[in-house]
Image (tube, rainbow, N blue to C red):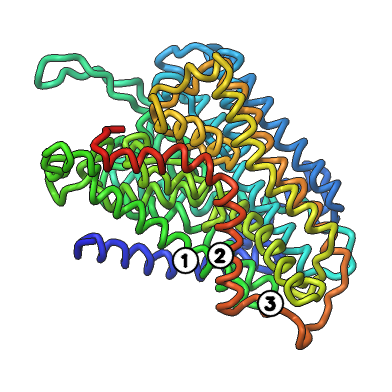
């Protein structure tokens, strides 16, 4: 890593920490019902919403009621989005007169944005109208992120409450998440992006003539407002098909820098809010330490692989420096203005945080460089993770870790004063096993069926990686893809949509059941036999469990895919 890259990385870490600490404290106050400075403006708005909806903010819901409200809310929103997309040509704000989507694609898009996946089997600027982008996708970007925050807060209450049946009120939690957290941050970020040159207008597309005399269509539209929540809410679905590699979505080095921070900001801040709400900030730092260890190792591997390029070039007598005019390495599929460092950092963060946006094409990464975002998704995206889902995802690993530690010493496992018994472990394992079922089970069906195999555009190990990556992305609600994989077929739109639903709600429901079970329990005082869950030993144990449970489950598939492809390059075989 050269000095420039080192300075950028240091600035990224420093600014992220400086922002996440006060934001985490603020989020803890919001979801604890404490007074906040925006409350002077927003409290009357919040009260008006509850009165209109006939809700009582103090009313508590059991975990089943909470889950039921969540499912109704999300599926109703997806249904509205599905109809909007189907009949897009009848809606206003469609200056390009774009037609409605097919049934299978509308289903895929509606499920994708409702589940916070934002998988895109289409080109945004050539498929969706301004109305669909604003009233359809952007609204779901807010609501999907708010749903993740609400679930995480409900889980936190499970640890902090004693002998209570309720875990909060879903409608209250999602309202506060939108109005007190997501909207203010997105508004500020959107203004910043406009300042950097991201368009936000309702003008028709512009027809331009290039210096070569060719005709070019330059897309316009409400871009900045969608990009802001796309990044902050771990959504990732871009306005343009090229996503954050497009100069209208990501025009400057400064926009790229703060979009990188926005990838991880809310997820990291929520972990700090967790520490404050449970009354022990050491627990938050322990979780962040485990996340950061894995992040640093995986980013180093991705950056090293991309910076060194393909060893097949050396074997064939080709100078690797011609692939990167600045420092050598693999520049295929990357923007010259961002270079290898920013591309590798983005790829690592976007897959670790369930964001899924890209500023470089992962299909063009080296085998080990592409393995990193794939591995991040296979472990459940708990290395910071998405908004809300990262925290409750790593808490599943925490429960499994304390259970294993309890077996080692012969004591009932505990975490934050709550005994972790067979019921919670069964639910945690159920949630964890859904990922391999979705990735390997549905992925095998896609590979073996003629309709699914046609989506793979590369032969050998790389083609296998394309398919694994697609189903890992859908199951982990990430949304990024190896660009060579064709997802816009009837088969893939339906199969991937089903996997997105399982990956989202198949985890949320067991997690809420765990929260309900823990909330009803007493808090056990700490004793000499209690395993400390804030020290170095626990951080190492938790990190090892994440790698073993998340990584080794998929080792055969990884060995046949990116690892085999990497080894083949040493024999001079181009992937």
Mark 2 closeness class: few <14, some 14–19, many ≥20 residues within 10 Å: many
Please identify the quadrant where the N terminus is shown.
Answer: bottom left
Task: Between residue 274 and residue 195, name the one nearer to us.
Answer: 274
Give the SS element for disc 2. helix
Q: Is residue 477 visible?
A: yes
Distance of mark 1 from mark 3, alpha carbons?
24 Å
Determine the image quadrant of residue 490. top right
x and y, in percent, of residue 400 in the image: 70, 61
Distance of mark 2 from mark 1, alpha carbons?
8 Å
Q: Is residue 212 left or right of residue 116?
A: left
x and y, in percent, of residue 188 in the image: 44, 52
Distance of mark 2 from mark 3, alpha carbons?
23 Å
Q: Is residue 85 visible?
A: no
List the residue tagged with mark 2.
Answer: 543
Q: Is residue 117 above or below residue 302?
A: above
Q: Residue at x 51, y 34 (%)?
A: 468
Q: Residue at x 61, y 24 (%)?
A: 445
Mark 3 closeness class: few <14, some 14–19, many ≥20 residues within 10 Å: few
x and y, in percent, of residue 473 in the image: 53, 38
Q: Is residue 387 above or below residue 273?
A: above
List the residue tagged with mark 1.
Answer: 293
Circle count = 3
x and y, in percent, of residue 350 in the image: 44, 47
Of circles 1 and 3, the one toward us is 1
The answer to whether the residue labelled 2 contacts the one labelled 1, judged by CB atoms less than 8 Å apart, is yes
Please identify the quadrant where the C terminus is shown.
Answer: top left
Give the SS element for disc 3. loop
List the residue tagged with mark 3.
Answer: 279
């Amino acid at each position: 890593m050269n000095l420039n890259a080192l300075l950028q990385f240091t600035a990224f870490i420093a600014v992220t920490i400086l922002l996440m600490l006060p934001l985490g404290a603020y989020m803890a106050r919001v979801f604890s019902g404490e007074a906040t400075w925006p409350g002077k403006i927003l409290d009357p708005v919040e009260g008006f919403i509850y009165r209109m909806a006939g809700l009582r903010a103090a009313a508590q819901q059991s975990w089943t009621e909470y889950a039921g409200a969540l499912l109704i809310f999300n599926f109703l929103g997806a249904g509205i989005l599905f109809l909007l997309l189907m009949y897009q040509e009848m809606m206003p704000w469609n200056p390009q007169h774009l037609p409605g989507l097919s049934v299978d694609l509308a289903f895929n898009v509606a499920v994708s944005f409702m589940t916070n996946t934002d998988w895109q089997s289409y080109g945004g600027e050539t498929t969706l109208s301004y109305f669909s982008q604003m009233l359809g996708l952007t609204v779901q970007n807010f609501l999907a992120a708010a749903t993740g925050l609400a679930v995480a807060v409900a889980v936190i209450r499970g640890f902090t409450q004693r002998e209570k049946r309720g875990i909060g009120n879903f409608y209250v939690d999602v309202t506060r998440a939108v109005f007190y957290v997501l909207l203010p941050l997105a508004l500020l970020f959107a203004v910043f992006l406009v300042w950097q040159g991201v368009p936000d207008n309702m003008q028709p597309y512009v027809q331009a003539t290039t210096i070569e005399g060719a005709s070019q269509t330059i897309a316009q539209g409400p871009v900045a407002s969608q990009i802001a929540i796309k990044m902050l809410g771990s959504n990732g679905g871009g306005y343009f098909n090229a996503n954050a590699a497009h100069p209208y979505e990501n025009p400057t080095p400064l926009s790229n820098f703060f979009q990188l921070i926005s990838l991880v900001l809310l997820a990291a801040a929520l972990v700090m809010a967790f520490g404050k709400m449970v009354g022990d900030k050491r627990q938050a730092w322990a979780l962040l330490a485990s996340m950061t260890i894995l992040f640093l190792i995986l980013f180093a591997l991705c950056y090293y692989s991309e910076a060194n390029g393909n060893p097949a070039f050396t074997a064939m007598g080709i100078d690797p420096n011609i692939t990167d005019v600045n420092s050598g390495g693999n520049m295929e599929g990357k923007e010259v203005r961002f270079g290898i460092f920013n591309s590798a950092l983005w790829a690592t963060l976007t897959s670790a945080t369930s964001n899924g946006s890209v500023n470089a094409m992962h299909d063009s990464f080296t085998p080990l460089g592409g393995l990193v975002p794939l591995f991040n998704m296979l472990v459940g995206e708990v290395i910071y993770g998405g908004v809300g889902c990262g925290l409750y995802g790593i808490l599943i690993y925490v429960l499994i870790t304390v259970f294993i530690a309890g077996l080692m010493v012969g004591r009932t496992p505990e975490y934050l004063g709550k005994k972790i018994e067979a019921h919670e472990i069964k639910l945690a394992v159920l949630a964890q096993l859904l990922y391999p079922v979705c990735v390997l089970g549905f992925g095998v069906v896609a590979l073996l069926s003629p309709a699914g195999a046609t989506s793979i555009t590369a032969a050998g190990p790389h083609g296998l990686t394309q398919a694994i990556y697609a189903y890992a992305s859908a199951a982990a609600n990430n949304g990024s893809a190896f660009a060579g994989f064709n997802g816009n077929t009837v088969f893939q739109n339906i199969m991937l949509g089903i996997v997105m639903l399982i990956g989202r709600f198949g985890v949320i429901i067991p997690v809420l059941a765990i929260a309900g079970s823990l909330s009803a329990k007493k808090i056990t005082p700490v004793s000499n036999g209690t395993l400390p869950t804030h020290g170095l030993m626990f951080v190492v144990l938790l990190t090892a469990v994440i790698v073993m449970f998340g990584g080794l489950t998929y080792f055969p598939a990884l060995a046949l895919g990116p690892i085999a492809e990497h080894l083949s390059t040493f024999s001079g075989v181009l992937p």
